[in-house]
Amino acid sequence: MSDEPRHPLLETPGPVLAVTRVDKSFPGVRALVKVSFECRAGEIHGLVGENGAGKSTLMRILAGVLRPDSGSIQISGKGVTLNSPRHAHDLGIAMVYQDTRLVDELDVAQNIWLEREPGWSFFVDRSEMERRSAAILLRLGIQIDLRRRVGELSVGERQIVEIARGLTADPAALILDEPTSSLDPAESKQLGKILAGLRSAGTGIVFISHRLPEVLEFADRITVMKDGEIVSTLENKGLTVDTLVSLMVGRTLSLAFPSKTAKPGAARLEVEDLSSLGHFQNVSFSLAAGEIVGLGGIQGNGQRQIARALYGLLPATGRVRLNGSRISLRSPGHAIHSGVVYVPADRRGEGLFVAHSIRENIAVPHLSAWSNFGMMSNRQEAGAVRETIDRLKIRTPSAEQPVGLLSGGNQQKVVFGRWLLAKPILYLFEEPTVGVDVGTKLELYRVIRRLADEGAAVLVLSSDLIELIGLCDRILVVAHGRIVDSVPAAEATEERIIGSAVRNKRENALTRDFSGKEAGQNARRVSIREVLLRRYAGAGLLSLLILSLGVYTTLRSPYFLTERNLGNLVIQIAPLALVSVGQMAAILIGGIDLSVGPSMSLTTALASYVIVGSAPANIVGGIALCLFSGILIGALNGLTILYLRIPDLITTLSTFSVVSGLALIVRPSPGGNVSEVFSDTVTTRIGWFPIIGLALILLAIAGESLQLRGRVGTQWYAIGSNPEAAFVAGIPVRRVRLCAYLFSGLMAVLAGLVIAARIGSGDPQAGSQFTLASVTAVVVGGTSIFGGRGTVIGTLLGAILLVLMQNSLNQLHVSAYYQYVWTGALMLLAVASYSMHEYANLGAKFNAGLQKRARL
Amino acid sequence: MSSPDRFSHALRFLHHLGAVWIAVILLYVVSGLISPGMFQVSQALNILQIAAFLGIVAIGQTLALLVGGIDLSVAGVVTMSNIVVTSLMVGRSETMVPALLISLLLAAAVGFINGSLITLARVTPLVATLGTNSILFGAALVYTGGAPHGSISPGFAVFGQGHLLGLPVSTICWLTIGVAMAWVTRQTTFGRRLYAVGANPAAARLMGIPVSAILISTYVLSSVMACLGGLLLTSYIGSPSLGIGDQFLLTSVAAVVVGGTALSGGLGSVLGTIGGAIFITELNSFTNIVRVSTGTQFVLQGAVIALSVLIYHLVGSKRISS
């Protein structure tokens, strides 16, 4: 260690972080077995191991995301139990994730301080937050505008924001999970400097990486893991990549990988000038029978997109020949038909039907082949499935076992096995051994080699360069969407591959704009105007629409602009506005509340019994009782969704039924009298303007300030936009979601009270139209139906537009029956245009950032 | 064996048998003990006759849930087919076949629109079908002006009201369609693809399955099933009635989830839904026997939906963790 520890307490560096004999199992896997590990103050501790060795599980335990089955954790010598990510962070463990856990919808400053914002109990001190963020970024030596949305950052910048977030609490230990996999060497160097700086300040740093040369360069000590166990912990003196690898694999490299092909056969795949806008350009290469070729380089430079384009998942131009004849790249169906198959990296997300049996999983691509006139042949299917299970030695009690219950290795064998039957010409493997134990890994390497030996061409993508070098006959280096080098097996080393990738970066000035990472971008400034426009453009548009509708109706009907009509309008808007703001909360956090309409009905029914007479105490008591019913319904919804894990849709659909029933039980038919004092108070006007309108304006102001500067606003956006990120940032996700449903229930009651005041009696059907109308107002107001984006102002304007339309149509003597038609149509139109817009944006973002790990 | 163990063991046992059929039998016995009339063959047949309408609509709903969606527009489609077919038949015989064809075509068109909204315009299934449901209801109001006229062809009544070999014709229609759809979903390539799309659309796409086409045809089938249910119901009551379909919005979902189909898609069966439809119909007649109010019926219905999802959920997670 070159830097002397300066902190007086750290003169004898003890472990800041230690785990002792930790065990952790998942269904079908023992992820950690009696793991003991420690990181000292002021050291960089490298942690290496193959995919599935247990590194990530160990780190997730240290970050408080997972709980160990047994064993203990000590921080600075004290035994602790980590209850949550928040707890771990408070105790001084900061975690920087591999697939950055940031909230795209929030800006840089908000992400750095998520759930730890400086400020007061309900509000965030934005200027203090910006000041402190700037200080941290300065310390890291990086400039990023704090107002930029994180969704538009490059992977490198996201990584920096993550690290900045880790430093907010001056952690005792900083854990970085694969921070360099998407960074180029210059950026990695920069990171190395930052880490060295932190080390000399006494922080203990755990550095997990696949890139062994970097680990050897940065780390003071290195721990090697294999199959959930610690193999050994070594001082970084005289270690080489080869020693590390043989520890990781448990045998020497030459034994781990099958021998390479002697001589490749005839050309199987010929790719000429393959281009896909924003992903890669003029890619040409060929693959021979018996050859395994890897696509390497720094991750996120278009390797994955090339493979996906060959499988018809990404539009591309150019010529692709298979066995000499041109093939169409229109869809996976076409690709499979011509003999191309693809094994994706995301096994659970894209590879398997987890709840279905092994038989069903294997059969899917062969349904046509195993059927006559669309009818399945069970005998043919069973035979073929049996054959696959035997050939790959899939360990399972029967072919009917759900694949979700198999181990990672056996799952991957099912994914492999389903394609073998079709005898494809070209295999595309993306991360073929991710999340698989070492034993199965070696089996899979042999399977891949055998496929090549049998005459197929194989293209492999892997973030693990050792795997790539060990398995492939040739490695094509991809940098910025071009193939810049072709490295034969004999010459392949990690340095050579990364070296070519970087050398050629400068030569490809043309493709610079792919990355969005060139010098100018980092310094991109965001003006206040841009921030406002981003948030309020939709609301502005809606206001214009409302204004023009108002003008048009005024011109056609003189009655429209009378004080009487305007006053009535406000009173009509109020219930819809109130219930929609509640609905918005539910939708914003990624849920929906269908029970609001019946809740309003129930409120009017209750009110007609309990809000009676003229004694203020009675009236207040009655209102309190109604509000209590709203809390009960909200709690029922929230608790059922969160603790019984029944989806929001079905939960609120069943409360819809239950509450409708209760309303009918309370008051089977319209009737009763709501207190006149209450009615008069609610509908009081100052001049023509009802005071309830003032209440709405106050609601808008309060709502907007809570969303913009309140803690709860940030929490809502974070949970709706990325629940996982919200959870690891320490937001009490369940409690916040429960509160959103409580709020929705309360707002429905308030809306119901306004209706009760207006009609002066109870009606078990009074709210029946409001479920649909509230959803419509919310989505017309610009809230994404998928959550994470929306404003109170927009929702209020949506409610105003809806009521105004009804009023205008009445003035223009259009049949009231049409309102069902246009409400439904308006909702569909709004959701469709927003989601198509969002989808297009997603596509654009995907195009712009080769760096960004694709989530599509 | 501890008692939670025994409990979960019992749950698993029921699950293998098809829990819904146990529930159907239990409820029948309970209602029979309260009102012995239930044990008469005629009463049992009556339940099966009535269950047919819900049963067919729920078969369509099953398909929508199997692909991971939901179809709330079945309510609007039932109302539409009722209004359209009566206004076109107007009590004459020669109009019967064209009227039936037109309402089936309209229903298919609605399903096509739902499917397109969901796949092409990327609207969530809930919002898409809630929207079309509202539009259909509005269209029915506008078309009839709030006061529907017309009646069915004389020959048409046999489907809803007639008996064949002692069995209600409606029940025969329902069971025939049910068995046919069960076969289609389990034993044809279309059905297997439907399950695959429901379990994991992204993986299905990577296996070369035309996901959009499967989704659109599923919603078309769902609408056509709702229409068939609506036509059978119309044949039973003989006249038009606005909002006649509204009851099916919740009951169809209830029948499907009671029948064991998961909301997450890809798990469940048409045969389970047949049991689910019988259970819901039994429950309604049970509540009539014990003379509870409409309000209580709604409460029960909501509770049944939530409870059955919960029970299947428990059984399911027990299975995965065992």
Image (tube, coloured by chain):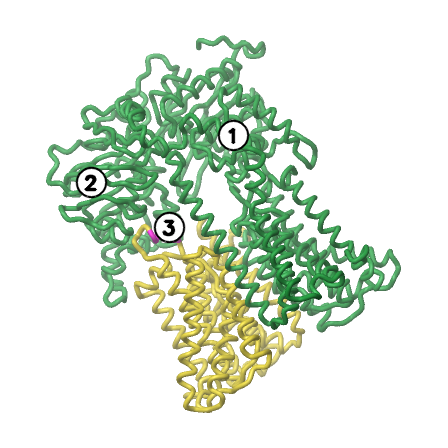
Chain colours: A green, B yellow
Q: Which mark is residue A272?
A: 2
Q: In this orientation, which residue lies closer to the viewer: A145 or A556?
A: A556
Residue hosting label 1: A525
Q: Quadrant of the N terminus of chain A?
A: top left
Residue type, label 3: Ala
Asked whether A44 or A164 is in front, the reply is A164
Tell me the mark number nearer the camera, choosing from 1 and 2: 1
Q: Is any part of residue A655 visible from this angle?
A: no
Q: Quadrant of residue A122?
A: top right
Q: Amino acid at mark 2?
A: Glu
| Marks 3 and 1 share the same chain | no
- On whether residue A198 falls in the magenta region, the answer is no
Sequence order check: which comes first, mark 1 or mark 2?
2
- Decide: few, some or many residues near mark 3? Use Cα within 10 Å; few <14, some 14-19, many ≥20: some
Task: From the viewer's perspective, tell me whether residue B138 is left or right of residue A522.
Answer: right
Magenta-span inclusion, residue B202: yes
Question: Within 10 angstroms of label 2, few (less than 14), some, or many (20 or more) residues?
Answer: some
Range covered by the magenta-colored residues: B200-205
Residue identified by numbered label 3:
B202
Q: What amino acid is found at the position of numbered circle 1 in the picture?
A: Arg
